[in-house]
DNA sequence: GCTGCCGGGAT
DNA sequence: ATCCCGGCAGC
């Protein structure tokens, strides 16, 4: 008895596959409208290639072409020939420059998710490439470090690598030993001094509001100034000119997150509480490609405020017009729900009574 | 309000 | 994958 009824509709179904097929097309259009939004955000990610290349170029000079294994930034423990070091400096600076300059790069991470300082943003951020860049990009720090110190006894990780990975802070420090000017990155300060110590003092006193306590300096000041080297000057300068705090800005943010790489080195440096107004950080999202490029101040920074507002779906999924045919529900009624086709039972598009 | 069914959650 | 339901939208 029961078999009869159900059987009728069952086999009589006709062509469920058709239904499905028809549906797919419907779905297609849906995915089409979506792109407008998705791409905007996702496209930013593609940046990886760029940063990666740059990074490779810097740390693994090998990529650059010069078959100089030594140029690999050996940085065993001390320093290489002055000339080489200088070259590296320039290359690094150039790499950083290109990185920080690239609008896509900056925009990408921030646009993706900016509100939350979670790892995500930075993960995707250009910073990651460096790490994975070493390898094929499978997100493996192991490989990279291995290459860096194939036979070096250095346990933690070569300072140079750290510099490149982390970006400015470290790099800057190192550079400072060379020469050049130091420019304060603090919002609308831009003060330029000829000595790092002077700059640090300036930042400590003027911006951090700390009394002179250089001995205790946790290095925080390092984040607030950059060096304008004679050689690299042009590069750095140009960057600072664009955004007083952007050149390095692109990297610093990620810095604090990479604790694993730099444990005892500068723990205090990463200390978040110590940073009242993270100028560097804020400057990063801002310039992203919106309006104000430079505003290293305690600002809420509606990160994607500038982003092409794509909140809801514009006209993404024009619901498929309701079919005229009566469906199981109507035919059998709620009383005989068990007679409905599964689709109807599941509140899906009826498979029995196709339109 | 009824109905069809999309989108998504639960298992 | 299967089952179910919230909720939207056409009627």
Image (cartoon, coloured by chain):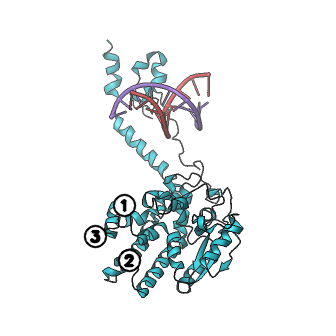
Chain colours: A cyan, B red, C purple
Disc 2 secondary structure class: loop
Structural crowding at the residue carrying mark 1, measured as other residues with C-alpha within 10 Å and reported as few (<14), some (14–19) or many (≥20): some
Residue A323 lies, in percent from the top left, at 49, 35
Give the farthest residue toward the left: A151
Spatial CA distance of label 1 from label 3 is 17 Å
Q: Specify which label sits upstream in the sequence, 2 or 3.
A: 2
Residue identifier under label 2: A73
Residue A105 lies, in percent from the top left, at 51, 66
Q: Which mark is residue A151?
A: 3
Q: Is residue A288 visible?
A: no
Residue identifier under label 1: A141
Disc 1 secondary structure class: helix
A5 or A30, nearer to the observer: A30
Instruction: Give the residue drawn at x 47%, y 80%.
Output: A89
A253 or A303, nearer to the observer: A253
Residue A46, picture quadrant: bottom left
A32 or A312, nearer to the observer: A312
Residue A196 lies, in percent from the top left, at 60, 77
Instruction: Give the residue drawn at x 69%, y 76%.
Output: A191
Which chain is disc 3 placed on? A
Spatial CA distance of label 1 from label 2 is 18 Å
């Amino acid at each position: 008895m029961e078999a009869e009824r159900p059987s009728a509709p069952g086999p009589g179904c006709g062509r469920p596959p058709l239904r499905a097929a028809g549906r797919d097309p419907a779905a297609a259009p849906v995915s089409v409208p979506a792109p407008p939004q998705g791409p905007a955000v996702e496209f930013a990610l593609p940046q990886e290639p760029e940063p990666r290349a740059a990074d490779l170029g810097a740390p693994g000079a090998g990529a650059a072409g010069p078959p100089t294994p030594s140029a690999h930034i050996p940085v065993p423990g001390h320093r290489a020939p002055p000339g080489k070091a200088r070259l590296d400096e320039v290359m690094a600076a150039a790499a950083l420059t290109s990185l920080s300059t690239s609008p896509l790069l900056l925009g990408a991470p921030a646009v993706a998710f900016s509100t939350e300082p979670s790892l995500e943003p930075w993960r995707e951020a250009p910073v990651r490439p460096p790490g994975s860049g070493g390898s094929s990009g499978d997100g493996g720090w192991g490989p990279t470090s291995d290459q860096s110190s194939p036979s070096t006894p250095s346990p933690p990780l070569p300072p140079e690598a750290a510099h490149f990975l982390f970006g400015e802070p470290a790099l800057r420090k190192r550079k400072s030993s060379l020469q050049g000017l130091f420019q304060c990155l603090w919002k609308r300060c831009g003060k330029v001094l000829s000595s790092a110590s002077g700059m640090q003092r300036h930042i400590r006193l003027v911006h951090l509001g700390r009394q002179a306590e250089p001995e205790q300096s946790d290095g925080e000041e390092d984040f607030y100034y950059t060096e304008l080297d004679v050689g690299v000057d042009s590069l750095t300068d140009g960057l600072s000119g664009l955004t007083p705090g952007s050149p390095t800005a692109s990297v610093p943010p990620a810095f604090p997150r990479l604790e694993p790489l730099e444990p005892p080195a500068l723990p205090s440096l990463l200390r978040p509480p110590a940073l009242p107004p993270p100028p560097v950080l804020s400057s990063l999202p801002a310039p992203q490609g919106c309006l104000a490029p430079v505003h290293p101040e305690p600002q809420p920074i509606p990160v994607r405020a500038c982003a092409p507002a794509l909140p809801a779906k514009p006209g993404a999924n024009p619901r498929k017009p309701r079919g005229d045919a009566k469906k199981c529900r109507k035919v059998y009624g709620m009383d005989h729900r068990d007679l409905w086709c599964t689709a109807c039972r599941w509140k899906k598009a009826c498979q029995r009574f196709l339109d």
